[in-house]
Image: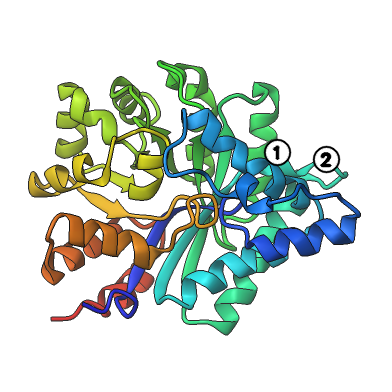
Amino acid sequence: MNYYSLPKIDLHCHIDGSVRIKTIRDLAREEGMDLPENLEKWLIAPDTCGSLDEYLTCFDWPNKVMQRKDAIKRITFEVFEDAALENVKYLEVRFGPLLHLEKGLSIEEVIQSVVEGMEKAKSQYDIEGGIIISILKTMAFEQINDVIDAASLFLDRGVVAMDLAGSELPGFSYNFIPYIEYAKKKGFHVTIHAGENGCGQNVTDAIVLLHAERIGHGIYISNDSKAYTLTKEQKVLLEICPTSNIQTKGVKSIETHPIKDFYDDSIMVSINTDNRSVSNTTMTKEIKLTMETFQMKLEDYFRIYAYAVSKAFTTDEIKEKLLSHIQK
């Protein structure tokens, strides 16, 4: 099967985890930064990390160079370009604006730079997309509404949803109820990182308390019957990132990943990259890995593709266009 030529959708892709290594070198040189030897070691996570927190350390250098408008725009454009060149037809990128204020940019300027990078890519390639605003669970609560207010100015220019990302502690959803409610009133969709490492209850909380329409990862519903049933009955799509789940010890190996069991039980799943650079991956690799491991057929792939289309935070017109790529 020619996995490269398949039409693809990536709903879970972090901009700062998908920066080209060459671009980090270029931008660091412009800033006069001294890069460590063997930069790849600092940017690409090992096949298995000690924990999710260890995996997250690979974002340090990308965020150091994402402090200027031109740098953020360039990086966003390149993420979309890399996706388009492997036949990704729709890409939703996510990022945390509060990580990019160290050199004086405003939250609005950061978001505008991402929007401009996406718009440039869409003008040059056959790709559609959206932007998800991530709130890091460990950051100061008093800044959250400022992020929501700034992002709401771009709801008609590609910003589509709010996300909670970062280290996963049990019961985190309770702390964010008023903020997600505020975002929903503004018109944002909601996707939440939950059940990535060890706590299926967090998925239940994200759906019940935060009204999540999609769940980032969600693989630990396999150990929580309530979360499993709720996800299935409410048709909440899981944004599965196979390689990343192995690296962060969410699963021991691809063979033990629950994605195929979920799929066989009609739970809505999608296949995504998470972080193209940190996980040293592409959509082509993720699809090949999943399909070959579980001996899935082309019709299985297009069913998963259709799941992703149905839950994409985009217009009916774009969804129809995306569905037209399915081979009958």
Could you tell whether 219 is left or right of 277 in the image? left
Identify which residue, 323 or 66, lies in the foreground: 66
Residue 12: % across, % down: 43, 51
Q: Is residue 149 visible?
A: no
What residue would you read off at disc 2? 102
Q: Quadrant of the N terminus?
A: bottom left
Q: Secondary structure at mark 2?
A: loop
Instruction: Identify the residue at horizontal 36%, vertical 57% (top origin).
Output: 312
Q: Quadrant of the C terminus?
A: bottom left
Q: Is residue 200 visible?
A: yes
Instruction: Identify the residue at horizontal 68%, vertical 49% (top origin).
Output: 62
Label 2, label 1: how many angstroms apart (C-alpha)?
Answer: 9 Å
What residue would you read off at disc 1? 98
**Mark 1, residues whose alpha carbon is within 10 Å: few (<14), some, or many (≥20)?**
many
Identify which residue, 85 or 149, lies in the foreground: 85
Q: Colour scheme in the image?
A: rainbow
Could you tell whether 34 is left or right of 177 in the image? right
Instruction: Identify the residue at horizontal 33%, vertical 48% (top origin).
Output: 242
Quarter of the image where one finds residue 214: top left
Depth check, mark 2 against mark 1: the one in front is 2
